[in-house]
Image (tube, grey):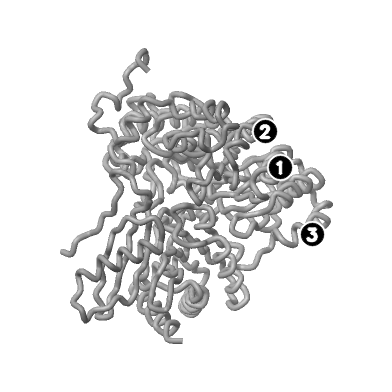
Amino acid sequence: MADQQQRPWESDKSKLSAFELTKLDREGLSIIETIRERASQGYSAFSEEDLVFFKWAGVYEQKPKGEGHFMMRVRIPGGILTSEQTRALAAISRDYGRNVVDVTTRQAIQFHWLTTQSLPDIFDRLEQVGLFSYQACGDVPRTIVGNPLSGIDPHELIDTAPLVEQLEKHFLLNPEFDNLPRKYKISISGNIYNTGHAEINDLAFTPASKVIDGEERIGFHVWVGGGLSAKPYLAKQLGIFVLPEDVVRVADGVTKIFRDNGYRQKRHQARLKFLMADWGPEKFTEKLLELIGSLPEQGKDRTDGWNAGYFTGVHKQKGDELNYVGLLLPVGRLTAEDFAELADLTDRYGSGSVRTTNSQNIILPNIPDEKLESLLAEPLLQRLTPFPRTFVGYAVSCTGNEYCNLAIVETKARMLSIATWLDEHVELDTPVRLHMIGCPNSCGQQQIADIGLQGSLVKTESGTVDAFDFFVGGSLGPDAQFNSRLKGRVKADRVAPVIAQLLELYKKERLAEEKFHQFARRVGTPRIQEYFSDVIASVSAS
Amino acid sequence: MFLYHVEISTTDEKNLVAVVIADSDDAAFKYAQTLAKRQFSPSQEIKESTIIEKKYLEKGRGYVFQTLE
């Protein structure tokens, strides 16, 4: 490092956390070579510090820590996979990951149960099909979230797939960005229903238009400083309009501002959202334009709602000639065999493409009308159905304590069982988005749910049981707002009936076309709290 | 080893928060209850203890709670 120019944050080392001082002396991405060199020697060949840097290679130690099993996250830029890539991922899961494949809330794929010995072969297999786990975790730009319908979307103003590719090329393995203050998430979508969940990304591009030199141009508005975790912030919009050809320049500038000005003293205050909270969008815009030169002022925002990233069902694509089929993966998990079969199905019926969504589901695009009936009759589609029931179709969960060291309770199987119970016991014509998390860190994006459920572990005289706190009324899009916590904790086996009771209130008092989050905000938390307190009192007594 | 955030409620409707270092959930409950009982009069009993969160034990880790106005 001696011959390297001093980086802006090095000038005052008293403002650097202990881990930041370590990062000054160690290039994060060098862990990839270290893993390749030492993996065959097994888990004990790596120091505790090495294991922390595994994240830069997209690898985390899974529960129980210390026993040499790892989770790996694979970047799926924009959620677009070929059938060849899908087969390669399925084979990795089958050979090394006990057949488990998870689709994440940022369109990535996760494996579990990997050993250090398996990592070099997995890196190679991924690279052979143009995929990477590198920078899927760590203090770096993560995978680029995009519109999973890019190029085929009747509701997109611009095809963002080429822009996702440019952004991926610019940020992946770029040493300029291998040491950011903290994780950094980018999304871009041309869809008018906010498929990129703009408000919860560090940097997001949403569709916009502006008349320039007498011609209406389609471009983007830019959102900066969003993020969830224990202290959630909604991103703020900058005062600029960005043409497609300027997207990479803007992303580069925003990322450099974060790299050079982001806080590095305390890791829990290092995300870009804290810098944005202090600077505000006006100052941020000013600093960006100083750095990258002028840009047009904001144009017309073209976002028209929020679809929460759901695409289940059979739908016509842009141009009306082909169809896409959105499949439900219950709580985002499937087997290696099923994933490989999806690759076969897209080759047989579609165009050899599989797409992942940030609602943890799958899309098979480009299905001709004449092949639809046969595809829908396939046995796999009876399980991963395009026509899910109301609750299972909109249930999200984090990994939970099955694999996560910090989760207090199990979430995936429980969320599925609660959603299934609700489907069997509650008649409802409107989707209600349920998100379950196993700790306050929000990997299951609880804060944006209609009804969010946060797990805890309760010990009473009669024993220890899992329990959940309830949160109501979250959404993104034009009326973006995080949900509000209700007082009172509900034991795990009573969560489903309590949700059912809340939905009875919704059904009774909602206005026409009113979604659950809109209802919760209109009637107000005090009204729902009063009702909720009565419900949990009666449930506890029963 | 983890740093646990545990909420404790008593039979006379008092609510306490305990922060304890432990290597398992069971141990966290035990340590939190022992610490809490030191704050009670002998007539008070613990009704319920709840683990809300755990973090890896590292320098600088902790929890922040708002004080009563």
Mark 1 vs mark 3, CA separation in Å:
21 Å
Q: Relative to the observer, which residue lies in front, A473 or A337?
A: A337
Residue A310 coordinates in the image, percent (x, y): 59, 55
Residue A116 coordinates in the image, percent (x, y): 57, 37
Q: Earlier in the sequence, mark 3 or mark 2?
A: 2
Mark 3 vs mark 2, CA separation in Å:
29 Å
Q: Please report, as a chain letter, where disc 1 is located.
A: A
Q: Please report, as a chain letter, where disc 2 is located.
A: A
Residue A271 coordinates in the image, percent (x, y): 36, 41
Q: Relative to the observer, which residue lies in front, A392 or A151?
A: A392
- At x 70%, y 43%, the residue is A95
Circle 3: residue type? Pro
What kind of element bears circle 2? Answer: helix
Which residue position holds label 2?
A: A125
Residue B45 coordinates in the image, percent (x, y): 27, 78
What is the residue that sits farthest to the bottom in this orientation? A542
Q: Relative to the observer, which residue lies in front, A314 or A491?
A: A491
- At x 49%, y 55%, the residue is A444
Which residue position holds label 3?
A: A379
Q: Earlier in the sequence, mark 2 or mark 1?
A: 1
Circle 2: residue type? Arg
What is the residue that sits farthest to the left in this orientation? B69
Circle 1/circle 3 CB separation < 8 Å = no
**Share a chain, discs 3 and 2?**
yes
Circle 1: residue type? Ala
Task: Tally the numbered discs.
Answer: 3
Which residue position holds label 1?
A: A91
In the rendered view, would you say A460 is above or below A202? below
Q: Earlier in the sequence, mark 1 or mark 3?
A: 1
Circle 2/circle 1 CB separation < 8 Å = yes
- At x 42%, y 35%, the residue is A49
